[in-house]
Image: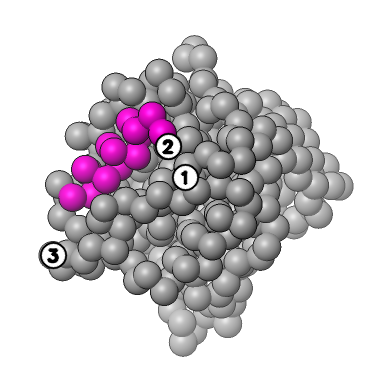
Amino acid sequence: MTKIIFPKPLSKGDKIAVISPAGAVEASQLEQGIEMIKSKGYEPVLGEHLYTKFSNGYNYAGTEQERTKDINWALNNTEISAIWASRGGYGCQHLIQDLDLKNFTKNPKWYIGYSDNTVIQSYLLKKGFASIHGQTIKTSSFGVTEESYELIFDILKGKTPKYSLKSHQFNKEGTTEGELVGGNLALIYALLGTKYSFDFKDKILFIEDIGENFYALDRMIMSLELAGVFNQISGLIVGGMTNMGDEKENKQYEESFDEFAYQLISERISKYDFPVVFGFPNGHIKDNRPLIIGSNLQMKVADKVKIEF
């Protein structure tokens, strides 16, 4: 088993790179987040192509070469102590064949993001490095709680979170322990069968998603089953399922934890024995609390749910 390396805690005055590895972003969308980094005593350093726009069937934050240049700069610059993605969207898959960790391996740093950034986090974990699956600098249309960011800064200072949740009707009780893998379901699915896919053996898998038709959600869960993922994992955590199905037909379209989406997942995994937690507050939701990908996790699912890193 690969020993997972955790970046050292940050100190006041340390520099945090802000980059756009995927979708294009407006400066106005990042102002609040960048000011927040400053208010915590850190120095935000903006990637050269943070606000670049390149349209090629999607509005990317620059060409593949420009985005690769920015992420490799952030990974290898010895003056940078953490990397915070401006947003997700689509585009991180373009970068992973050309990522350079030459200096990063000598000076590991936290990579923070979610959604499309799951691809980068899977890559880093394959190389033995933990990362933070948490809120990007750009907040979504539904906003973000203050605690979502505060808990990220806690991790940057070396403090690991503990979570206690209410029970959920679809939970499967039990106790388990394992390394946490996962993130956005669409990207976990997109990496299946590639050398960049997560290793699922004895791991606790986390999944979340947004904007998928119910049949597409079922297709992705079916693919995980056909790939043998559910025969390998020791536990499952299901986070936000938002804007699922048809907006006109689904009364829970705006809800953070879509009940029908949960029902579909629950039915698909009903024959497996591992503990399952539904309703974890992470994903494309307002209360987006960070998870540490690569961290060892203890999970107890009973009348109440306890999750500790």
Query: What is the distance, in whole Å, between disc 3 and disc 1 at their CAs?
Result: 29 Å
Query: What is the distance, in whole Å, between disc 1 and disc 2 at their CAs?
Result: 6 Å
Q: Tell me the element at label 3.
A: loop
Q: Which residue is mark 3?
A: 56
- Say if mark 3 contacts mark 1, CB within 8 Å: no
Which residue is at the front of the view, 113 or 179? 113
Residue farthest along the right direction in this orientation = 303
Q: Tell me the element at label 1.
A: strand
Magenta stretch: give its range. Answer: 66-79
- Say if mark 1 contacts mark 2, CB within 8 Å: yes
* Residue 113 inside the magenta-drawn segment: no
| Tag 2: amino acid | Ile
Query: What is the distance, in whole Å, between disc 3 and disc 2 at their CAs?
Result: 31 Å
Which residue is at the front of the view, 207 or 127? 127
Position of residue 196 relative to residue 64, above or below, is above
| Tag 3: amino acid | Asn
Q: Tell me the element at label 2.
A: strand
Spot occupied by residue 275 in the image (x, y as percentages of width and height): 68, 37
Q: Nearer the viewer, mark 3 or mark 1?
A: 1
Q: Which residue is mark 1?
A: 16
Residue at the spot 60% in from the left edge and 31% down from the top edge = 9
Residue 152 marker: none
Q: Which residue is mark 2?
A: 80
Which numbered disc flags the more N-terminal residue, 1 or 2? 1
- Pick the quarter of the image with the C terminus: top right
